[in-house]
Image: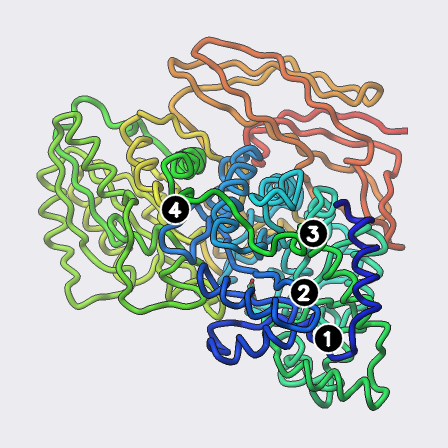
Amino acid sequence: MNRQEAAIKAREMLSRMTTEEKVAQMIQIPYAQEGREASLRWAKLGVGSFLHVLGDDAREIQAAAAESRLGIPVLFGIDAIHGHGLNEHATIFPSQLAAACGWEPEILREMGEVTAREVATDGLHWTFSPVLCLGRDTRWGRVDETFGEDPYLAGELGAAIVEGYQGKDLADGEHILACAKHFLGYGEAVGARDACDSEITARKIREVFLPPFRRAVEAGCATFMTAYGSADGTPFTAHRGVLKDMLRGDLGFSGFVVTDWNNTDSLMANQHVAADIGEASAMAAHAGNDMIMATPAFYEAMLQALREGRADIADVDEAVVHILTIKYEMGLFDRAEKLGRPGCIGCEAHRQAALRAARASVTLLRNDGMLPLSDGVKRVAVIGPNADDIRAQYGDWTYFTHPLPIPGRPAIRPYVTVKEGIEALCAEKGVECEYVKGCGVLPEADDDIDAAVRAAKTADAVILVVGDMIDQFGEYKDRANLELSGRQPELFARLKETGVPVCTVLVASKPLCLGDAAERANAVLCAFNGGMYGGQAVAEALFGALNPSGRLPITFPRHSGQLPVYYNQLPGWHGGKYCDLPAEPLFAFGEGIGYTGFEMKGFAFSPEDMTLRLTVANTGERAGTQTVQVYFRDMVSSVMTPVKRLIAFRRVALEPGEAKEVAIPLRREDFALVNAAGERVVEPGAFQLMVGASSKDTDLTVLPFELT
Ligand code: BGC
């Protein structure tokens, strides 16, 4: 059933519903918080949705909903953020940030498809993914959930995963609803403090934060989630201008909007723009929130507000039609339970997809020739807190963490940590391998740096795996200081003193200020949270079985005090630097190297045919993949525009010695800006294209041109 037909059915159903049934339809109940008994009562009352419930519990709720007067099926939502990770048998992909390092939409599409199939097989319908917030102030605790700092890259990867989740037919039993979140500006909260006000203007919203969400709508994303925060004094939950005018009006969105967790109550309790829960409920509904997540009090409060004339039934009707439309479109009225493919959860084919994504995510940032480890390496010392820590490797939103952490829960196989990956390859190659943890991410009683140094001294190569741990990222866990924590810097320094080459591997939720562990390391490899096979992919890269091709989707600062360091800043003067630190980041957006060399040449671009042409050559001795990055600058414009902005990229796979001609079509509207009146326009005049291997000026070739 297409959306128009579904909307007709939804309106028919609406005409049969009582006010109580309509308000109930807007509610989403958190199963674990409410408990089984209360949840069953809510289901019989006819609530629209539940979240965080799996398998048999979901089936029981669905059966209870069938007993409600109208028998409207329940929609089940879950945070399947990088795989259906709350199910402990599911396939665990790299985090969004790690997956973004591949700059490969196909990887994200596959991640979406696999995740959808596993979620559907659990009888569920909907994932609260993707996150399209930008990771620009990396002190924020949820940077791992983003696609990095760039609006264009986030939009392309976001659109791909949405298409993967939703497929072509939401009713085919294998696809699920995607949810673009958090709308809007959540990642930009002041001081990077979660759920605080975002210092963003209407123009900046349109220029920087809206584009990835626009792409999600173009990709057909069926649901949106409202952000916790506020802008210019208006909580997004109460922001009709954003939720109605911008989302439905300008972007043409026709799905439904869910609040984030307890946003409605927060209008009263935290943001103080409503005096009581009745006012907050009316406000949330009027602003354009269709479904109310985790505020069960909305039910009584909204009914009361309607009786008192403080709320408008038209807002309720509209919300219910939006929700029911999607339920019809998904075919829930014909078959409430999603079927998926029995046996597919964590199956071999799905795990292979996780391995592909992990391989694509590995990003080599520095290499003095230490890597790939040569045949001369007969003994490897694997050291560091995150070398053998599957929780750190999985990152957030898995069964270890969110939202129902069970302390001490054992890890479920299969997975491969970095240590295990290295051990497996060492065994194949007859190389000796010794593992010593050395120290924790945070100081631990059994830290033993001396033992790590002893292991290093007898080795030909040291692989030091540093990073962060779940206490340092996620919701409520923003960091003021991004330096390597605990005794990790000391561990690096002591290992370096041995004179044995050290490769630093970063298994972390986000860019950390690595200091010497990057600047003085012989090689630096970034893995972020690589998922179940992250460790295998790292090991393959270390030994050269994999030629790393990741590129950073986010900038690494040298120091937390440099933040923000995202590449697409507005131009400044007075040097734009600090008197005690350079302005340059540690590693730039787009950076990444491999084991072969590339050359780009023969650039040609004319605005007449709007196609950029160039030749990319592999000048080295190994097959590899280069990512051509295309940036532009508007040289004179009515408002200030960034020094460069990504508008296209293309991955090019090349055999040794091979050269390929590449044609990258661009569109005139790619060169648009948002003017002072908030309109997206292309202003004629001088422009520059900048084409190359990263966002660094030294990696870019400049092609000036004019638009008339
Ligand atoms: C998070 C959302 C998430 C929701 C449901 C909230 O706290 O901000 O991203 O989808 O909880 O778990």
> Can residue 149 be seen in this snapshot?
yes
- Residue in the picture at 18% in, 54% down: 438
Label 1 or label 4, whichever lies nearer to me, is 1
Residue 531: mark: 4
The residue labelled by disc 1 is 21
Front in this rendered view, residue 651 or 552:
651
Residue 692 picture location, percent across and down: 59, 27
> Can residue 480 be seen in this snapshot?
no
Inspect the image, locate mark 4, and give the three-letter code of the amino acid beneath it. Answer: Gly
Number of dots carrying numbers: 4
Callout 2: helix, strand or loop?
A: loop
Residue 72: mark: 2
Inspect the image, locate mark 1, and give the three-letter code of the amino acid beneath it. Answer: Glu
- Residue in the picture at 70% in, 70% down: 25
Q: Say if mark 1 contacts mark 2, CB within 8 Å.
A: yes
Q: Quadrant of ligand 1?
A: bottom right
Residue 373 shown left or right of residue 14 in the figure: left
Callout 1: helix, strand or loop?
A: helix
Q: Give the CA separation, mark 1 to mark 4.
A: 42 Å
- Identify the image quadrant of the N terminus: top right
Label 4 or label 3, whichever lies nearer to me, is 3
Q: Earlier in the sequence, mark 1 or mark 3?
A: 1
Q: Give the CA separation, mark 4 to mark 3.
A: 27 Å
